[in-house]
Amino acid sequence: MTRLPAHLVAERAARAAETVRRQPCPRCGADTLTARTPDRVAAVDVRTDPTPIDPKAGIPAGRLAWCLTGGDHTPQRIRWRDRWHAPHCTHPVLIDHQCPPRPVQETLL
Ligand SMILES: [Zn+2]
Ligand SMILES: [Zn+2]
């Protein structure tokens, strides 16, 4: 049995990290999508809300927008939605997950 060259092993590990997964948020337990961006230079681990927003209605203040790329025949990826891409983007648009504020009752107690 031949061992895979190290760069191939690393590439497979990177691809696994890029796979979009549905996981509960470790802090608030909300349903979220998580993946590493496929950027070669500055890959970041992203956690987004699972429901795409309508970008025409505007990106909520303080949130980052991400494209959900891929589909039926290509694996899904989460990519940074930069301002050059945004005007002609046709992808579902996800925004980064922010844990909801604690219920009022809980902070009062
Ligand atoms: Zn896009
Ligand atoms: Zn959360």
Image (tube, rainbow, N blue to C red):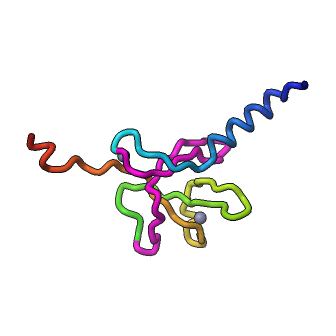
Q: Is residue 48 above or below residue 106?
A: below
| Res 8 → quadrant | top right
Q: Is residue 105 above or below residue 86?
A: above
Q: Give the x, y percent position of residue 17.
A: 62, 40
Residue at point 45%, 71% (across, down): 54
Residue at point 46%, 52% (across, down): 48
Q: Nearer the viewer, residue 14 or 40?
A: 14
Q: Does residue 99 appear to the left or right of 86 in the view shown? A: left
On whether residue 94 falls in the magenta region, the answer is: no
Residue occupying the far right of the picture: 1
On the rendered image, what quadrant is the C terminus found in? top left
Q: Does residue 46 appear to the left or right of 60 in the view shown? A: right
Q: Does residue 106 appear to the left or right of 92 in the view shown? A: left
Residue at point 40%, 55% (across, down): 63
Q: Does residue 5 appear to the left or right of 28 in the view shown? A: right
On the rendered image, what quadrant is the N terminus found in? top right
Residue occupying the far bottom of the picture: 56
Q: Is residue 88 above or below residue 11?
A: below
| Res 70 → quadrant | bottom right
**Extent of the magenta region:** 29-57
